[in-house]
Image: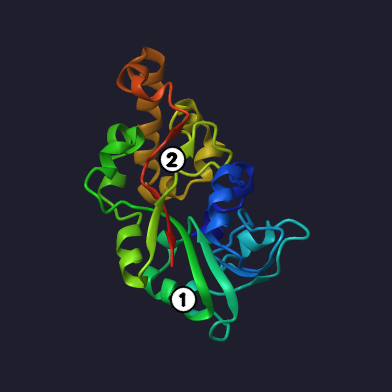
Amino acid sequence: MYDSIGATYTTTRRTEPRIAEQVWAALGDARTVLNVGAGTGSYEPSHRDVTAVEPSAVMRAQRPAGAAPCVAAAAERLPFEDQSFDAAMAFATVHHWRDPIAGLREMRRVARRVVVFTCDTTEASWHSRFWLTRDYLPEVAASRVGLATELARAIGARMEPVLIPWDCADGFFEAYWRRPEAYLDESVRRGISIWAKVGPDAEQRAVRTLRDDLASGRWAERNRDLLDLEAAELGLRLLIA
């Protein structure tokens, strides 16, 4: 997918330091780290020996100078020996894998610790928790975009909630929960794969309706409980095994 939609990924997608701190703490004392589905290199800890895996040539080409060495490979078939790394991490990528459980089992094979950032959409309340899916993108509620509970069970991982700060620097899908006008920006949407998955008709309908609701004050009336929050719990999870 990212060979076709990822050309401007770095415009809005970057490391959010408060989330990074939680991810890096979960890595424990690991010195060697494999970053699977590494993309352009966000969340790679600079003070550790990192090796990246990324199948998309477009994404690999956007990795900055001095970034960790990157191997072209898929999560389901990692080209490394058993227990080659202290830890393996994956950030906001498992929902793109052909077989997420196989990918996580590969991570467990090559590393002694596994840390995965994903979204727990298996709980019934998730689809109604975030106003963008609840009020504007019902297509997302009908899709399977996250697997945290199932994946945690498959590899015996524990789950930690990850709160999203209101001014999150990383422009993933839920990041603008208190800044709704951001979703009207084409460059913001191009950094979020869900918009490509729902298709242009659903995207334009959602943008048009959201724009109207912002102008009329309807969005603020519906979501007044969010306006004073510093961080939101929207189902993001860290799996640690």
Which residue shows up at 36% across the image and 13% down it? 216
Q: Is residue 234 above or below residue 66?
A: above
Q: Name the N-terminal-most of marks 2 and 1.
A: 1
**Image quadrant occupied by the C terminus:** bottom left
In this view, which residue lies farthest toward the front?
29
Q: Is residue 31 above or below residue 231?
A: below
In this view, which residue lies farthest toward the bottom?
81
Q: Which quadrant of the figure has residue 98?
A: bottom left
Which label is found at residue 212? Answer: none
Residue denoted by label 2? 174
Q: Position of residue 153 (x, y in %)?
A: 31, 67
Which residue shows up at 73% across the image and 56% down it? 64
Q: Do we see residue 147 in this rendering?
A: no
Q: Is residue 2 above or below residue 169?
A: below
Q: Where is residue 198 in the image (x, y as percent from the top left)?
A: 36, 47
Which residue shows up at 35% across the image and 26% down it? 209
**Regarding mark 1 in the picture, which secondary structure is present there?**
helix
Q: Is residue 203 above or below residue 239?
A: above
